[in-house]
Amino acid sequence: MSKADRLIYLPLGGAGEIGMNAYVYGYGKPGKERLILVDIGVTFPDMDGTPGVNLIVPDIAWLEQNKHRLEAIFITHAHEDHVGGIGYLYKRLGGVPVYARAFTAHHARRKMLETGNAEEDIITASAYPEFIQAGPFNISFFPVAHSIPESSGMVIDTPAGRVVHTGDFKLDETPVLGEPFDENMWREIAKDGVKALVCDSTNVFSLKAGGSEIAVAPEITKLVSEAKGMVVATTFASNVARLKSLADAGLAAGRSICLLGRAMQRMVAAGEATGVIGKFPPTIPVEDARDLPRENLMLIVTGSQGERRAASAQLANGKYLGMQMKEGDLFLFSSKTIPGNEKGVIRIMNAYSEMGVDVVDDTAGIYHVSGHANQPDILRAHEIFNPQIVIPMHGEHRHLRKHAILAKENGRASQLAVNGMIIELTGIQPKVVEYIETGRTYLDGSVQIGAFDGIIRDRIRMALNGHVLATIIIDENDEPLGDPWIEVMGLAETGTSNAPLVDIVEADLGQMLMRSNDKTLRDDAKLERDIKKEVRRSVQAEIGKKPEVTVIVTRLV
Amino acid sequence: MSKADRLIYLPLGGAGEIGMNAYVYGYGKPGKERLILVDIGVTFPDMDGTPGVNLIVPDIAWLEQNKHRLEAIFITHAHEDHVGGIGYLYKRLGGVPVYARAFTAHHARRKMLETGNAEEDIITASAYPEFIQAGPFNISFFPVAHSIPESSGMVIDTPAGRVVHTGDFKLDETPVLGEPFDENMWREIAKDGVKALVCDSTNVFSLKAGGSEIAVAPEITKLVSEAKGMVVATTFASNVARLKSLADAGLAAGRSICLLGRAMQRMVAAGEATGVIGKFPPTIPVEDARDLPRENLMLIVTGSQGERRAASAQLANGKYLGMQMKEGDLFLFSSKTIPGNEKGVIRIMNAYSEMGVDVVDDTAGIYHVSGHANQPDILRAHEIFNPQIVIPMHGEHRHLRKHAILAKENGRASQLAVNGMIIELTGIQPKVVEYIETGRTYLDGSVQIGAFDGIIRDRIRMALNGHVLATIIIDENDEPLGDPWIEVMGLAETGTSNAPLVDIVEADLGQMLMRSNDKTLRDDAKLERDIKKEVRRSVQAEIGKKPEVTVIVTRLV
């Protein structure tokens, strides 16, 4: 380790939010560090802040400018907030190798193909104790329990010491499917000392140790075996262990299992193709399910978050692929609702209620367990890895802050690092050495737009205020030709005058134009400003709203 | 009771949703019943479904058509979802008397004045055992414990028997402030038999008996007395008992109390003016608060639901009225988050986290109690009133359904009644006798618009898809004059061609017009259709979005 070299950590996404994870590590001379990227995820838009947007990815401008320094990308697991951005962003990062374990690589390859990239750029990696060299880094995927198969943390060996990046994890010794928490392996990784632990913070406010996936199955089995009509259950499609628990419960109750929803079928297929599932319980196609008595049937469906196009919502709307819920059926949410999705989930619950379907969710805390470590589990991870420095990641600001406070209370160095902060990890204490510009990029239709381009702001304004279009024609003598023409979208048709709004505004605008002097009529910018102002005044007087206004002045020359 | 007369119940709002309560009762010959209305509330809009809308009220078209049959309006309590619509809708209901108890009447009068009505139309009513005659009904306000002063249920005596309409209630014998649950009074009301209990369903899925308001104060006192910096607490402004608990806790810790936020000051003033508070603990104006050491200060602020303009959000953004949160301060949410408000609340929590403020919410279940009866409390109300019929109200469909199932399991007649159903209560079993059209009316700016007018749908479409305006001028010979002109709002400026989007679309449109035959150019409707189609095709090819398109064809004649 040369004296001037340093080890840096730079989150581009996921630190200060839950979503679009992207963490950079660097080693070398300041400003010339060789880099790796761990994860490249997406986050999902909503009507409040990002209407019409398809997906949100981290702003990788900094990494793109430094792509000649980038050695490789590593993907910890196949959740969208970790792998979802690979296809959209890969081209901008200069064609470096992308490493992931088999199940994750399977998904990453599909994403590459869907976006016109080559699937060969995804390299299947083996797990710890195998290592991959990438510039000054020597890296190993170590298995962790989470809520999707083959989740991994990263052992990142550097000349400045070993960094452990947990990825998303929980301490589950009996995860039903996939690799359990292996304390001996963790202690072996830790035994020569850990410089820094970069650690999942999601559940830091959950004060009790987390439950095991294995505890869920018996409760589900009990519930399903007591059900009289058709049983329909939903969970995250990627939670293959839960899918198995659900299917096993259905089979134990003498029911045939049918998976509905493309994401779910894709996950099981990926699990079988990569061998992580072993033997998934037998399922039947929906064509066969239609003919079975409903008391002999269990559907496992997508849409645990109330997504409008998923199978759960389709069934709530009526018939879906020939299947229909009826009075006496049971619907189970074997999931938790992510904040922001409450209204969509409640909408579905009420639609089922109208059909006479009994809806069971995880209010009782027995039909779901989280995939993330709770506070005691996080502290146990600190204790096992015994790092010199703890850097909280994967959390909103409040999660990272709490996590850092806990680490310090236990005598460890810690730094609250949010997106865009370059943290030097070389010394005894972590140190903020630089702030870089970061943020969010929106995938909108087929283009990428910036969060501050004003495009989304304009859409939100149209949604709040409506949109008025005013066109006038100015003739060769700089006089209005005919009357101004108004079109409105998203505004009431009539207001206080009881006459059509467009007629009122056209009349007001006509009067304003008559009053305008020659100078104004010759000046496009001034004319447009005046028209805008008059339209807003007129609409405000008539219906009490100040709309967005677009003015088109056409001059006959 | 004439043989042909009947007693009916008709919810216009609040049955199948939590919000905009409005319940009609009628007695008389079918179609000629004399009517009363209990409550006339609002519900709040959101960006998902009602962007830009100010408020949502029940569609009262049916009641307006039958206003000659309406005897009076009764308002159970001063929450917005019960009283909020009185000002906006009163004129349409023919000037009938409006009865409410003093605190509620105080708020109703303000709403009447704000909407150009006369405050004299609000009549202050006394509580049980006093009765008010309204046509065939004899009605009494009986005090119940809830989360706002002077909440009441209604005893509604009719020739067909006594109906008890609970209003919003909980069974709290020690509510800190205001009237406690009085079992003896309830038993007295019940003693000659109750025909029907129309009963709050909000918390029917909460399986444990509800806690008392009095249990909250000691926990808050403990928290505040241990705090080092400034303490800021929020709750619903209308929960005057909680305001008192919070203020008492601050005073006990030697702190001066300052109320921030207009709604809060208004509630305390109303409570003092109507005598329901007694003596509220002393408070200081914000001008004085600025000069106090922060460890001697406690602010009680509006904005428990993360509302963008409330005091809590203003403080999260920075300075507000000279006050500013700092590292080491404490912020307490003495409230629960209403579904749909999670993201706003979390946004504020993270803003405080960035300031180094410790945020405490009710995760532990000790700093807040609900104002509604939990399932065991609901069943206890059934037991005390011992009605022949139970009609669940004040709940989403799932709440009403569960409540009806519980009533039937206990051997009572019950009917799941949702907005628009006329239920006859005269017989042994409740009976659905008619469905009327009902729904939601939006207050948008200064006008009322219907939920299905298409106006809001257009706004949502603009938010999702962006808006393109295309104008062309057709000359006297039915030939395009000059080039078409495109303006866009809410769309990316450049797409796959790397040229400005408007240039591309204008060029495509120009080519299309060149190809158009004379017949099309003479036909406005066909021309508009073709232009719309071409604009959408062109934008889709360029940026992958199908925008809303408004076409303006101007003909020079």
Image (cartoon, coloured by chain):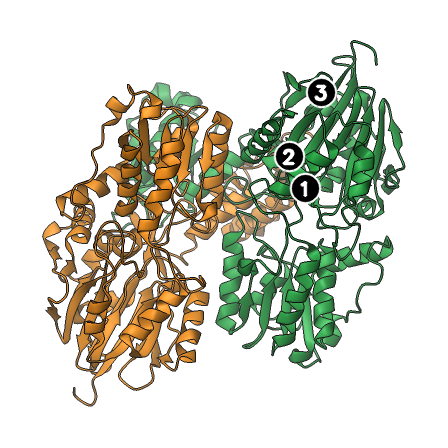
Chain colours: A green, B orange
Q: Mark 1 to mark 3: distance in Å?
A: 25 Å
Q: From the viewer's perspective, is the residue at label 2 or at label 3 nearer?
A: 3
Q: Quadrant of the N terminus of chain A?
A: top right
| Above or below B554: residue A326 | below
Sequence-wise, which precedes: disc 2 or disc 3? Answer: 2
Residue at disc 3, secondary structure: loop
Task: Look at the numbered discs 1 and 2 and tell me whether their residues touch, using CB distance below 8 Å.
Answer: yes
Residue at 75% in and 51% down: A173
The residue where tag 1 is placed is A81
Dot 2 corresponds to which residue?
A14
Residues behind callouts 1 and 2 on a single chain: yes
- Tell me the SS state at disc 1: helix
Query: What x and y, as percent, mark residue A99?
Result: 84, 37
Q: Is residue A419 visible?
A: yes
Q: Chain of mark 1?
A: A
Q: A379 or B2: nearer the eye?
A: A379
Quadrant assignment, res B293: top left
Amino acid type for the residue under numbered disc 3: Leu
Same subunit: marks 1 and 3: yes
Please tell me which of labels 1 and 2 falls first in the chain.
2
Q: Which residue is mark 3?
A: A425
Q: Residues within 10 Å of mark 2 (few under 14, many from 20)?
A: many
